Amino acid sequence: MITIAGGVYRESCIEPHWDDIFGSAGRAAVALADTGETISLHTVRAKSLSAGIENLSAAFGIDATGPEVEEGVEFEYMHSLGTPRITPRPDAIPQYPPFEVVGDVVLRFGMLEGSARVAGGRVVYDPQSAFDPRPYHENGSSAETLAVILNRLEGRRLSGRTEPSEIVEHILDEWKADVVVLKMGGHGAMVHVRGEAPVPVPSYRSENVWKIGSGDVFSAAFAYYWGKLEKPAAEAADLASRATSYYCGTRSLPLVPKDTLREVVKDAVEPRGGKVYLAAPFFNLAERWIVEEVREQLLHMEVEVFSPLHDVGVGPGDVVAKQDLAGLDECSVVLAILNGGDAGTIFEIGYAVAKGIPVIALAQNVRPEDLKMPMGTGCRVYEDLVTAIYQTVWAEP
């Protein structure tokens, strides 16, 4: 049996469209539904989400247990990499006492309504909060063997450190963790086992990138391979990374078998340096919004960005054009926003192609005729914002 504790929430996304009831615990339970293991799901059950919870049971044989409350929590995304609007606001969500969870193999997620107090054998803990991640033992939880999975932002907030090595050292020492998996976005993860040298695990490319729930899938796969099958942490993390890539590319669950993952998910991302040139118009509110959003997401992924708006600014063409192109000369890849057919952006694409600089383009509601030259000269064109961002991060310099 694998016991999963965490939130079941409503999720919606504008682009691409998405509206369903999953949450971290619900998605992890579905991810493991075909493993042959009995899945025990413990959550705060909201009556307003009862139909969705019943669907999980009917479709995947997952029965949820836990305290009942009236209203559930909703996450609304503009795009799958964006910061969600949470309803009610996190500071207005009622807090309930911890509920007790016992199991030999437990996957515990952080929750907005409270927490699960775990007494487990092999336990995987994913704090699941960019706002207020909580230490594992804070609510009285215990584990014979503890693995912690977290991203850099969670690690910084939990440890007060900024360097990855210092974050991991804090978690290993203060939490008495046995394994720490520090995720680093599109650049994979580092697996730290107490007393052993850290092992890098790559992320794997997918042609499309859907990010909502990707961390849930990683943690679920790791809990199965490390917690239940007792595979080495680095191998479990590698399989989890492949499972995440498959999910991001297909949005399909449950997980496919590990042999299938190794066969169909092979394109590992090689970490690289370089700078991204953000080619885009910024002459109205909508255009400014997308430039700000893309730049913020890239910087959050610790990618260096040259943005003509931010690094040069507005001004006469005989001044800004030279400075923009000088900035482009220093970049290793271009992310171009083709929405609107801006002449300056088209010029920058042609300049990059002539210089041999790879170009990734976002084109939404653009006529096929207007894409002939970019696509005919090797530019890779996508309709989804998040996919374009990740393909840019992964592009070869």
Image (cartoon, rainbow, N blue to C red):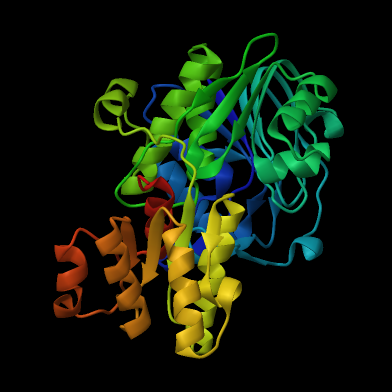
Residue depicted at 39% across the width and 32% down the height = 242
Report whether residue 73 is seen: yes
When the figure is inspected, residue 240 is found, relative to residue 48, above or below; the finding is above
In-image side of 261 versus 33 (left or right): left
Residue 15, position in %: x, y? 41, 68
In-image side of 273 versus 242 (left or right): right
In-image side of 226 versus 18 (left or right): right
Residue situated in front as seen by the camera: 15 or 294: 294
Rendering quarter of residue 142? top right
Residue 192, position in %: x, y? 63, 20
Residue situated in front as seen by the camera: 343 or 152: 343
When the figure is inspected, residue 254 is found, relative to residue 291, above or below; the finding is above
Residue depicted at 30% across the width and 59% down the height = 355
In-image side of 357 versus 219 (left or right): left
Residue situated in front as seen by the camera: 84 or 194: 194
Residue 81, position in %: x, y? 51, 58
Q: Residue furthest top?
A: 195
Residue depicted at 46% across the width and 67% down the height = 326
Report whether residue 253 is seen: no
